[in-house]
Structure formats: structure tokens, C-alpha cells
Image: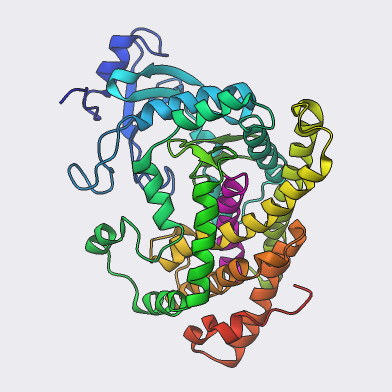
Amino acid sequence: MSYLDLGTDNVLTYIRKHGVFFSEGAKLSVREIDRNEVDGDGYVNHIFRVWDEGGNSVIVKQAKPYLKIFGEGVFPLPVARSASETDIIEIRSAIVPKYVPKLIHVDRGNNLFISEDCGKLGIMRFGLSRGRRYPRFPRMMGEFIAKCNFYTSELYLDQGVHKELGRRFVSPEMSRIMETILFFRKSVLDDLIAERETPDPTHASLSDIFWDKRDVQAELLKLRDIYMKKQECLVHGDLHTSNTMINEDRMKIIDMEYTHMGPYSSDSGYLLGNLVYTYDTWFYHEEWTEEARAGYRDEVLGYISETLKEYIRCFSWCWESAVKDFFRPFPEYLENLFADYLREVCGFMGSQICSRVGSLAETFDFDVLPDLKARNAARALALATAYNLIMRRGDVKSPDDITDIVRGTAEIFRGATRQSSNISLITTPRTVSSIPEHA
């Protein structure tokens, strides 16, 4: 083995040897971050939290040549993803420092880095599942995505620098994961996951009904073409609510190893698809009153539309402040970018839902519901919403058009479920295509 293989038995020795962060002689403790409500998913890398008696803490993250979830020798991955992640953290720290963890120590030889611990902020996915509110989220997230997009695009960068960034952040091994998971029923990970998990039969049936639709499969191929061919800016590549550390006032974005050149729309769509999960499950959190659930659903829909509006506002500000002279005389070009952006975001929101619900992957947003029937009803609603987001994206002209699709699908779905107890019927094309014209 050509690198130091970190574990809980030797992380502290490494920290003390390199004199990282903590005072000499400090009493240190370590815990490996695992897949749970405190830590998050923990699928890919080996990550450790180290702290002292005073509560000071850091995160140690090491890339090993395999997916953590499957173990050594099962699904090879390049360890160079660690160097890519530290590089993009440095780039984004120059653009939006308040939203990026601070790097403390980088060891490229051992494929690891040590960074600020953002754990005290809390993982957004789990906060949303408990009904927590984040009033500043749309402004913070809209600014994060807009500035990261604009300042790594050719609208701002020299053409040669832009292309060099594209060459720097190319990882075929990492890209093929997203290029299959987001757009195909069977991904590169499916056989491995199937060996570990037995899906609920109703969930499997819902997935079968969804993926039997030839029309949606064809549209997903079109979205995949956009995802793979548009080289507009450096995108996060895996931006979702488990990689969003947040409280009422602050936000940090983590896990950037999937960064690549892609479309302006992909991060927004991938992230906001997660908020559709939240919206859908809050029809079924029976511990709250119906009035309270409805109020929280409105809050979540507001996060979707307001994040998109803030993105457009902030991107426009960047254009006015710093766009290259070649583009400046053509505001109609910017308007066309925004029109494409909104349609693509709508489609990518749908493909994100397909990637989790349609592939039978465990998803905390649904799994937190204790009643299996309610869980599957929420999944069916999510798949119906995904269908409409994908198929109706061409009609989208504003952020509110997207939230109208989400709301309109739920209204029809809920009306249909009151008339029939067979939730498998809800995802037929006849049902999900009948959104009112205003939606």
C-alpha cells in the first residue's frame, strides 16, 4: 500500500505527528463518521471527527481506492478525487468563502485533508424532516450557486483558463456514477446495492410502473445529453440537502469530489429535487396537525421558488459587475441563459427524484415515516411529480411555474388517493399528465 491507511487507531497519531490544529499535549478523541442522522450518508469516503476537551474539532477526510459502503476491491475509485476536492475548495474559497469549510492541512501523498468541522451547523436533510425552518436558505444557496457558476464560466474567465479548468476537473470514474444514476433505471451501482438490500414490494412495483413509461425514458436521455455536453461552469456535482450544513444564519457546503464542468442548471436541479422529497413527505407526518403540515409545505415550496429567484438576481448582479466586454452589449443572451436554466432545472429536479425513488435507494426523507403505507404513498407522489417535472419542463417560464407543477401534481394525486386505495394507479400516465392548465 502506497499511502497511510487511516483508521480510528492511527488518526490521532497522524494529527500529533504533523502538529495539526490542536495544542501540544491536548487530550484528543476520535470517531469515524458513519451513516446516521448525526453524520449523514457516509457512502464514499472515510471521514473522522477529532476533538479535544475544550470542544475544538476538525474533520479528517481520506479518499481510498474504493467506495466505503462496499469495501475494498468491490468498486474501484480514483484516489485523485481527494486532490480535486482540495483544489475546488480553494477555488470556491476565493469566490464564496463564507459558504466553504476552511482547509487546515492537505496531504496529497496520503490522499487526505483536514478541514473545519461544520457539524455544529447541522445537516439540512434531517432538519427538514423534523420541520425545522431555514428562512435565509434561499438567499444563501442562491448566492452560492450563482457566484460559483458565474465566476467559473467563460462569461468571466479567459477562454483558455476556462478550458484548463475543464481539463483539471475531469474524472471519468466519478462522472459515470452520476451519468447513469440520474438518467437510467439501472445504474453502475445497482447490482451492488441489490446484493445488500431487499426492496419493499410496493416500492418496487411503483418503480416498475414509472420506468415502463417510454416517454419519460426518452426525455431523460435528452436531459442526459444536456448534462454531459454543456460545459458552462464548474458544478458541485453532488449538491443535496445532506451536503448542506446549515442553521438559521449560516451555511457551509461540503463533499465536492464530484466537481466537473457542466450546465449552470445541474446543481440547482439536483438540490431542489431534494426539497420535493420534503414537500411530499409532509403530507404524511401525522405527528403534526394538517394545518401545520400545510404551512410547512408552503414554506418548502417557497424555498424552491425563492432560491431560483435569488440565483437569477445574483447571477444578474455578477453579469452587471464583471461580465467580459464581449458579452456585455447582449442582455438578450443573458435572458436566453435564464430561460434554458429554468427549463433544465425543472427537468433535473425530476431526474434527481428518479435517481433515488425510482432506483429503490434508501432515502431518509421517506424512511423517517414510520407507517409503510404512508411511506409508499409519499414515494408514489414523488414519482408522479418527477414525471411532470420532466415532461412539462418545456412550459416553464418562471420559478413559480416549477412550484405550480409540484403543487398541482400533489392536488391531483391526493384527490385520486381519496378515491382509490391502490397507490400503484397514481403513477399511470393518464393520472399524472392531467395537471390543470394553470400549473
Q: Which residues are magenta?
A: 263-284
Residue 153 horizontal/vertical position (percent): 63, 33
> Does residue 90 show up?
yes
Above or below, comparing residue 44 to residue 22 in the picture:
below
Image: 327 above or below 396 = above
The one of 264 and 95 positioned closer to us in this rendering? 264
Q: Nearer the viewer, residue 321 or 74?
A: 321
Please tell me in which quadrant of the rendered image residue 275 appears: bottom right
| Residue 97 falls in image quadrant | top right
For residue 391: magenta? Answer: no
Q: Nearer the viewer, residue 42 or 63?
A: 63
Residue that lies at the very extreme toward the bottom in this rendered image: 419
In the visual, does 346 lie left or right of 427? right
Position of 242 compared to 330: left or right?
Answer: left
- Magenta highlight: main SS: helix
Q: Quadrant of the N terminus?
A: top left
Q: Residue at x 59, y 70 (%)?
A: 385
Relative to 178, say whether 420 is above or below.
below
Judged from this view, the residue extending furthest toward the left is 1
x%, y% of residue 241? 54, 48
What residue occupies the far top of the structure in this picture?
24
Count of all numbered marks drawn on residues in the image: 0
- Name the image colouring: rainbow
Tell whether 385 sits left or right of 49: right
Task: Say which quadrant the C terminus sits in.
Answer: bottom right
Residue 287 appears anywhere in the view? no
Residue visible at 28% across and 10% down in the picture: 17
Q: Position of residue 436 (x, y in %)?
A: 74, 79
Q: Is residue 280 above or below residue 46?
A: below
Q: Position of residue 185 (x, y in %)?
A: 39, 66
